[in-house]
Image (spheres, rainbow, N blue to C red):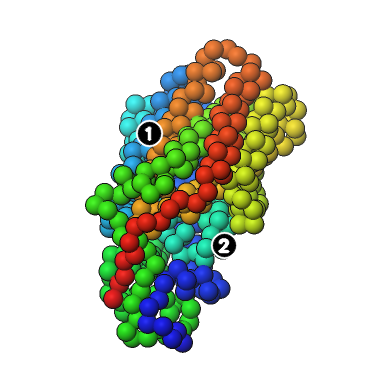
Amino acid sequence: MFKSTVTDVQDVINAHPLSGMQRWVIALCFLVVAIDGFDTAAIGFIAPALRAQWGVTPTQLAPLFGAGLFGLMVGAFIFGPLADKFGRKPVLIATTVFFGLATLASALATSVEALVALRFVTGLGLGGAMPAAITLTSEFCPEQRRSSLVTIMFCGFTIGSASAGLAASHVVSAYGWQGLLLLGGVMPLVLTILLVTVLPESIRYLVLKHADPQRIRALLKRVTGEDLPEDATFTGTIKPSASPVPDLFRNGLATGTLLIWVTFFMSLLVFYLLSSWLPLLITTAGFSMANASLMAATLAAGGTVGAIVIGRFMDRFDPHRVLAVAYLVAGLFVILLGATVSTPWLLVASIFGAGFGVAGAQVGVNALAAAYYPTAIRATGVSWANAIGRTGSVLGSMVGGFLLSLGWDLTTVFSVAAGPLFVATAGMLLKASLGRPRRVLQPVAAE
């Protein structure tokens, strides 16, 4: 039983082991992000089939990759502030339904132009769902385990991406590329039932919005298993200004925000260059479509392992330096991709290593962003970092087609692709020197 009638909700979460409700939050957000990763990666795995069926060139396929990622960018810009205004749960549910329906519609496309338009619409929902899931998970985690738990949750994205490759190796040959998109559209709609009935709203967000104290008390009891005083006052968040976006640059946050944005941009540029074009590059090197899908899926598998390892190290050591090392290692493995393309087992090892560093560190930098911003602007901070990063992903998806059109050998292509990862390394090292931002906004309480 708590003796004080003034209760900091984050202190309560920090003082108790993970409850069943918190595990449900992590698991459901994991599934949302996994399906997000599946639908995002699916277009890369169906590219060889589209090329064979419609006779399109890599240059013509480039807008198809870019449209979805541009939608992701716009969706992140729009839905992050909405999640700070209306709640994490309703935005997560709405965006999950949205990208599920749009993915189903994409399976009906009869031309590249129609598929480009539908992939943009799909991207809007995908871009909003991911930051909402990251934010909600972060706000249910104890601070001492936040990085590792958020990265475990976000492993859903890399597992989903890898699952798209595994599914493509069977589904596309049996049912065509449409079958993979139909699968990607049905899964989020089924998951929505659980999100509506089981997923709770963020306790910290409810305090911020002066929600009914009885509702807050009931949720905290599900975390702790203990009753709180009937007259308890709940604190633990900060009062936002009228618009959350300018707050990303106030109170000592500006330089850190810019460095996070640079890191997201460079990281996602390389990740989507690889995830979009690896299947096609591997088939160009002489491998079958099925083998290319399986080998390219190793990128996401490496990212899953990398995210878990990197998350654990981020909780134990300076997270910025951990991420800097991860990006450095990733850059070296990306360079190796071009040199090992003629040796299958070395190529698979290099893809795994690149995924370990690139995708693993990208998961980690999402956790870093969630920890960097206060509750009032956390969803906006995470979503805008993702949105800025998506501009890099759009560029990366388009650059692959451009590099192929130049006729460069694969060694040169991958050496150029590694460059942004060394910039991300520098960005994390610079942010490590900044220290923690000031927290000067006033506390807000739900009474």
Towards the viewer: 100 or 154: 154
What label sits on residue 131 in the rendered view?
Answer: none
Residue neighbourhood size for the residue with mark 2, other residues' Cα within 10 Å, grouped as few (<14), some (14–19), many (≥20): some
* Residue 238, picture quadrant: bottom left
What residue lies at 26% left-to-right and 49% top-to-bottom?
243
Question: Could you say where residue 401 lies in the image, as x and y percent from the top left?
Answer: 50, 21
Question: Could you say where residue 193 lies in the image, as x and y percent from the top left?
Answer: 37, 63
Residue neighbourhood size for the residue with mark 1, other residues' Cα within 10 Å, grouped as few (<14), some (14–19), many (≥20): many
Residue 90 appears in view:
no
The secondary structure type at the circle numbered 1 is helix
* Residue 117, picture quadrant: top left
Question: Could you say where residue 414 lies in the image, as x and y percent from the top left?
Answer: 62, 24
Distance between mark 1 and mark 2 Cα atoms: 33 Å
The secondary structure type at the circle numbered 2 is helix
Question: Could you say where residue 434 lies in the image, as x and y percent from the top left?
Answer: 52, 44
Residue underneath mark 1: 70
Q: Amino acid at mark 1?
A: Phe
Q: Amino acid at mark 2?
A: Arg
What residue lies at 48% left-to-right and 54% top-to-bottom?
371
Q: Is residue 421 left or right of residue 346?
A: left
What residue lies at 34% left-to-right and 57% top-to-bottom?
441
Q: Earlier in the sequence, mark 1 or mark 2?
A: 1
Towards the viewer: 285 or 426: 426
Residue underneath mark 2: 145
